[in-house]
Image: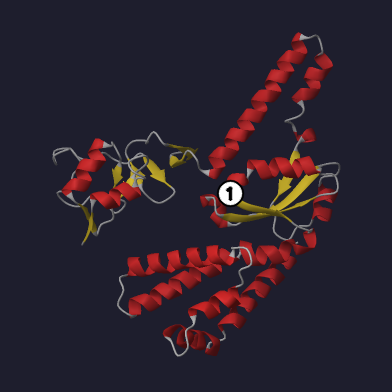
């Protein structure tokens, strides 16, 4: 059984600024942690159910838990909607700074500006301009954004003649603002179309405008790559469990290691080969592990995974 201290819940709630704090079945809040959560009005949720005898902080054990009305993207069930969360769809809640909520805000602001311009044009006796503005949000004036894997701009422009088209490919880490998103423009799309898209999706992570001939290869590396990375994290955690670590700790350590290692690779002038060599001391533990990976054809397996994903993507078009 793991204890969640006041220090733990401070970190989990960003010093009381956001919640909910998720308490798993094998975790127990200390009295200090309960007092802190009660004083800062931070919601506490138990995804696997509230432990027997456990009560909400400050309830004294007398309050019966209500049936959950909301779900969150991280699997928690809530009886009330926290102030810092909003609806993504139905009763599914996300933080208000979620990329998809930010995107909705941009669209709402754009529609509001166009509506105001329409009203001004009508008020100034320019009905033709007002009517033209009405079509800006309509299909005739929109920019078509496609994330269909393997479907080229040439094919899209044949299907939608006269449209301004952007072809994109995001990856799943865009959902947490650390994604990689690729963009290429059709023959009628202008630089301002691409720039507007970059501004709208800046909260998703890195955005790179690339030649279309790179799109399928880039998608194989960064679009499919998260699945490969998750398998690597899971495999490292399995190794840690075999060596005696608890599953949750092994997964946390592996994920944090991968996050930090990726940030080091992205530093100016860094190269993964040099960074790998820096970790491998002569006759040490790391080089022994690297040798085991080489014996298992680790690099070749990774290359095969990317090329297999690339070939499948090419066939989808």
The type of colouring in the image is secondary structure
Image quarter (top left, top right, bottom left or bottom right) of the C terminus: bottom right
Residue at 51% x, 43% y: name it: 98
Q: Is residue 54 visible?
A: no
When asked about the image quadrant of residue 173, the answer is bottom right
The residue carrying mark 1 is 204
In the depicted view, which residue is nearer to us: 221 or 32?
32
Residue 183, percent from left and from top: 72, 53
Q: Is residue 223 above or below residue 144?
A: below
Q: What is the total number of numbered labels drawn onto the structure image? A: 1
Residue at 34% x, 67% y: name it: 249
Image quarter (top left, top right, bottom left or bottom right) of the N terminus: bottom left
Residue at 39% x, 75% y: name it: 238
Residue 261, percent from left and from top: 51, 67
Residue at 39% x, 78% y: name it: 239
Name the side, left or right, on which 40 lies relative to 239.
Answer: left
């Amino acid at each position: 059984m793991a204890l969640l201290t006041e220090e733990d819940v401070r970190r989990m709630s960003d010093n009381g600024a956001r919640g909910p704090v998720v308490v798993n079945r094998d975790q127990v809040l200390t009295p200090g942690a309960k007092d802190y959560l009660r004083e800062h009005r931070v919601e506490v949720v138990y995804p696997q159910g509230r432990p027997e005898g456990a009560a909400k902080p400050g309830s004294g054990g007398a309050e019966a838990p209500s049936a959950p009305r909301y779900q969150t993207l991280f699997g928690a069930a809530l009886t009330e909607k926290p102030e810092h969360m909003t609806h993504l769809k139905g009763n599914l809640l996300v933080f208000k700074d979620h990329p998809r909520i930010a995107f909705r805000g941009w669209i709402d602001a754009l529609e509001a500006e166009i509506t105001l311009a329409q009203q001004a044009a009508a008020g100034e006796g320019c009905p033709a301009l007002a009517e033209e503005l009405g079509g800006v949000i309509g299909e005739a004036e929109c920019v078509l954004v496609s994330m269909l894997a393997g479907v080229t701009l040439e094919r899209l422009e044949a299907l939608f003649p006269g449209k301004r088209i952007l072809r994109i490919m995001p990856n799943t880490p865009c959902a947490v603002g650390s994604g990689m998103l690729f963009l290429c423009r059709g023959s009628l799309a202008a630089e301002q179309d691409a720039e507007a898209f970059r501004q709208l999706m800046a909260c998703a992570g890195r955005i790179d405008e690339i030649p279309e001939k790179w799109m399928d290869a880039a998608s194989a590396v960064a679009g499919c790559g998260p699945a490969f990375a998750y398998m690597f994290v899971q495999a490292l955690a399995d190794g840690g469990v075999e060596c005696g670590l608890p599953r949750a700790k092994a997964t946390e350590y592996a994920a944090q290691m991968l996050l930090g290692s990726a940030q080091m690779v992205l530093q100016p002038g860094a190269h993964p080969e040099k960074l790998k060599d820096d970790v491998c001391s002569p006759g040490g533990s790391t080089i022994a592990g690297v040798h085991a990976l080489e014996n298992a054809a680790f690099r070749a397996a990774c290359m095969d995974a990317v090329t297999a994903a690339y070939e499948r993507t090419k066939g989808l078009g």
